Image (tube, helix red, strand yellow):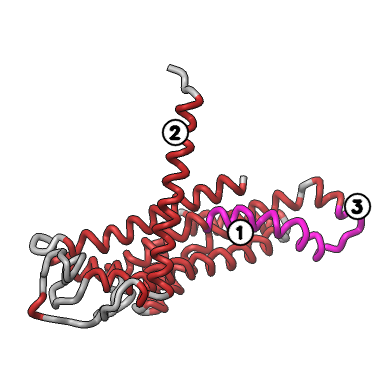
Amino acid sequence: MSKTPTHFSLIRAGRRALLATAAIFLAFVLLAVVVPQVLTSGDPLNTNAAAAFEPPGIDHPLGTDQVGRDVYTRIIYGALPSVSVGFTATVTSAVIGLLLGIGFAQFSSRARYSVSRSIEVLMALPEFLIALFIIAFLGKGPIAVLIALSLAGVPAYLNVARNAAVTARVSESVSMAKVLGLSRTRILYRYITPTSVQPVIGLASLGVGFMILSAAGLSYLGLGVQPPSPEWGLMLAESREYFERAWWLVLFPGLAITCTVGALTVLARALRAALR
């Protein structure tokens, strides 16, 4: 059965609706990061033993935890450490990888070969595992998680930037620029760098969600934000013992992570399609 124009129109409408939903959700998350007081007037650290394990209701829309803290308030305030670490680590990794990739692309072919093999070795290891190794030396805490994730993400961006820069070096536009007598610095600035930036941006747009997920995973293991501070991964870790008694303690922080990563992925794919 052939696809009719109406069928394609429905697909496009569905994609636009999905993109709009993702954008609206991320706007809500951004609001929680920047001004959480607009979304809740509660205190994420306020305890009330008498209200412990209250299910979702009028007073507490997402219920309360084992010491009576409001889950909704903690999720709202937990957006800042969860999202900021992922975003900052992605930007840091992308910038370092871009600069190193462009720099390594200027080496001789023999030196580039050695760099390529080293990058392949690093990329063979999962970024999460590399981050764990780094944290083993730095110690736990949000700063250590940020540094570990930033360094762990560098090889992927370095590889993309290096490949793009090497391709740009042998392009017709660069060859013509050399014939016209443009300096090496100007060629680097005008031709090679812009060509390398585009694929790095595309990769970084997808990398933010992965970094947020990794940061939550490290906090779940007790290596990131420490109690009683609110953070999505830490909230999951604290609630795992109470799943059968209070399902909402696991469901809502898990949904916050899943929906945020999913929304970022939807927007990232749209951005990559626009950059092609």
Judged from the image, the secondary structure of the residue bearing numbered disc 1 is: helix
* Marking on residue 115: 1
Residue 99, placed above or below residue 22: below
Name the main secondary structure of what is drawn in magenta: helix
Mark yes or no: residue 122 visible: yes
Q: Position of residue 219 (x, y in %)?
A: 31, 70
Distance of label 1 from label 3 (alpha carbons)? 29 Å
Judged from the image, the secondary structure of the residue bearing numbered disc 3 is: helix
Which one is nearer the viewer's eye here, 263 or 11?
11
Q: Position of residue 269 (x, y in %)?
A: 50, 48
Mark 2 nearby-residue class (10 Å; few <14, some 14–19, many ≥20): few
The amino acid type found where label 3 is placed reads Val
Mark 3 nearby-residue class (10 Å; few <14, some 14–19, many ≥20): few
Judged from the image, the secondary structure of the residue bearing numbered disc 2 is: helix
* Marking on residue 10: 2
* Marking on residue 179: 3
Residue 227, placed above or below residue 89: below
The quadrant where residue 196 appears: bottom right
- The magenta stretch is 177-204
Say which of marks 3 and 2 sits in front. 2
Label 1 vs 3, first from the N-terminus: 1
Which one is nearer the viewer's eye here, 247 or 70?
70
- Of all residues, the one furthest to the top in this rendering is 1
- Whether the residues at callouts 3 and 2 have beta carbons within 8 Å, the answer is no
Say which of marks 2 and 1 sits in front. 2
In the image, is residue 193 part of the stretch drawn in magenta?
Answer: yes
Quick one: quadrant of the N terminus?
A: top left
Distance of label 3 from label 2 (alpha carbons)? 52 Å
